[in-house]
Image (cartoon, rainbow, N blue to C red):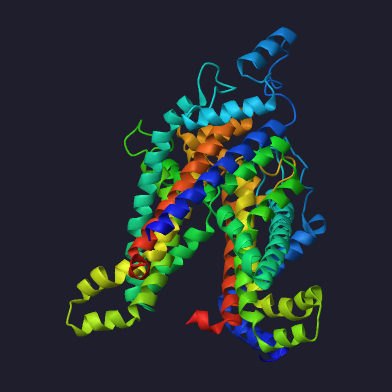
Amino acid sequence: MLGIFLRRILLAIPVLIAVASITFFLVRLAPGGPFDADKAVSEQVLKNLNEAYNLNAPLSEQYFDYMTGILVGDFGPSFRFPGRSVTELIMTGLPVTFELAIYSMLIALFIGILSGVTAALKRNTFLDYVPMSIAMIGICVPTFLLGPLLVLIFGINLELLPVSGWGQLPGDKILPSLTLGFAYAAYIARLSRGGMLEILNQDFIRTARAKGLSEKMVVIKHAMQGGLIPVVSFLGPAVAGLLAGSFVVETIFQIPGLGRFYVEAAFNRDYTMILGTTIFFSVMIVFFNLLSDIVALWLNPRSRDT
Amino acid sequence: MSQSSSLWSDALRRLFKNKAAVAGAIVLLVLIVLAAFAPWIAPYPYAYQNLDLGASPPSSVHLLGTDVLGRDLLSRILYGARISLLVGFIATTVALIIGVSWGIVAGYAGGKIDSAMMRIVDILYGLPFIIFIILLMVIFGRNLWLLFLAIGAVEWLTMARIVRAQVLSLKNQEFVLAAQAMGVSNFAMFKRHLLPNILGPVAVYATLTIPQVMLLESFLSFLGLGIQPPMSSWGTLIKDGVESMEEYSWLLIYPGLTFTVTLFALNFFGDGLRDALDPKTSE
């Protein structure tokens, strides 16, 4: 099994280099210079600006400089926020986005697994139909619609919770986390229901029951370990979705996180910021995919011995 | 291998028994007709402004009310349906063409070609595509056709996997071996023997891809990176609705409702189609 891990990790390195290179050249392909949007700058100022941002050097040298910079975590200066480096900006937004992602994932896992496992155990009853119908709603109502609706109901009409912000007013973290977590709760509920149904029909579960184990032990100790493997495999790709969701949620709730920085950078054509965050996101996504693959492999006893 | 006509008529019969799928299909048909004939059905042109009126709640003149610029919301939803559905169908077609050809070639060629092609798919799976689409939209401007292509180019991966798995299972069946023995060319093999036999799963996955593609488009439009005014898709209407929801909640509620109902219809129809074509999974 160690071999599989090593191969996966080794494969991830060229992938990341390719992503960084493609992004770098795509951004350089962009028509117009990064300072075109500014008000008429004189020839000399433009020259100095290009000098300061190392844009006069030959492309190959710029590329080489950039790639070696990444290795030590240096993504260069931001085009739009003079004097601040992209790394600094990423580090300011990251803790906020990270916290938001953790809360939403905890909500999603708790609600999702609880309702999915219950639905599988009480198959074709009220406790199966109701959560699964709600899960269908969770999959069909997009985040950018759910968020404003929750704001409209709980923030504006009922005046129960703050409508925006992060960590400034009590309870302002509830709506964003709920908005981002709901769709994942729905997916996880469906996945864990499917996984549990498959496992519950297997012989070793019958053996465990025949041994006289309590139903609780059968479910928690024997069924859930295998039944939740699909959920674990889903968590890696879910990180990519969480990032995309954070773009929307952070925009709606005006949260100063990485997602909002990214969307703003896209609007301002802050090319170094886009470049840096894209590469940073890619590294995170590849890493979490790897992690969830490894955990899923490790949870599956059949692949553990090989 | 049964006759393909009986397979399809069986599937159709099962599909008609599934109430949710039939309801989904009816909703979709109505929507497609409304979108296609929007210029004749819509009570007002989509960009017609009545600044004196401004935002007004639903009334007998404007069934779903008007937006801040006095534009009729019903008309804008109908025209938005054209863009949203068009994105759904075109991007899915792009995904279909790439995915099916990729999957057939990989599955049929087998060996090193297969593993190389599927390795590429594995790698692409792990990449942050939404971010790349945003990057493309930023760099090359917010072009409608680029948007279709970019979204389609992202969604083909699962299709390629499904098709490859199907082709692998068909490859060693007698009729394919017989056709090979008769010296049928590769192209004729794809067209006459493989394609008709993988149509079922492909149709199912295509129906389930459409809602994903529409979500992606509206996600981008919501962020302001997709469809640009004065054109509107459901995503941009929801975005506009969010901006003024405190005073004019109907501007958010009606476009949101239309979009959600459409997504429901597509998902129910797709699930129904899957169960109808492969009764084993519905158990």
Count the marks: 0
A143 is higher (above) or lower (below) than B20: above
**Closer-to-camera residue (A5/B43):** A5
Percent of width and height locating residue A144:
53, 47
The image quarter in which residue B194 lies: bottom right
Image quarter of the N terminus of chain A = bottom left
Say whether residue A221 is left or right of residue A27.
Answer: left
Q: Where's residue B129, x and y in %?
A: 59, 48
Instruction: Tell me the residue at 48%/49% (across/down).
Output: A10
Who is closer to the viewer here, A181 or A27? A27
Q: Quadrant of residue B93?
A: bottom right
Residue plotted at (36% across, 45% down): A102
Q: Is A62 displayed left or right of A178 in the figure?
A: right
The residue under the point 56% across, 58% down is: B122
In the picture, the quarter occupied by the C terminus of chain A is: bottom left
Side of B5 relative to A170 (left or right):
right
Left or right relative to B157: residue A120? left
- Residue A163 in percent (x, y) is at 43, 38
Location of residue A161 in the rendering, given as x and y in whole percent from the top left corner: 37, 41
- Up-down: is A192 above or below A125? above
- Would residue B119 be visible to someone looking at this image? yes
Q: Is residue B65 or residue A305 the one in the foreground? A: A305
Is residue B141 visible in the rendered image? The answer is no
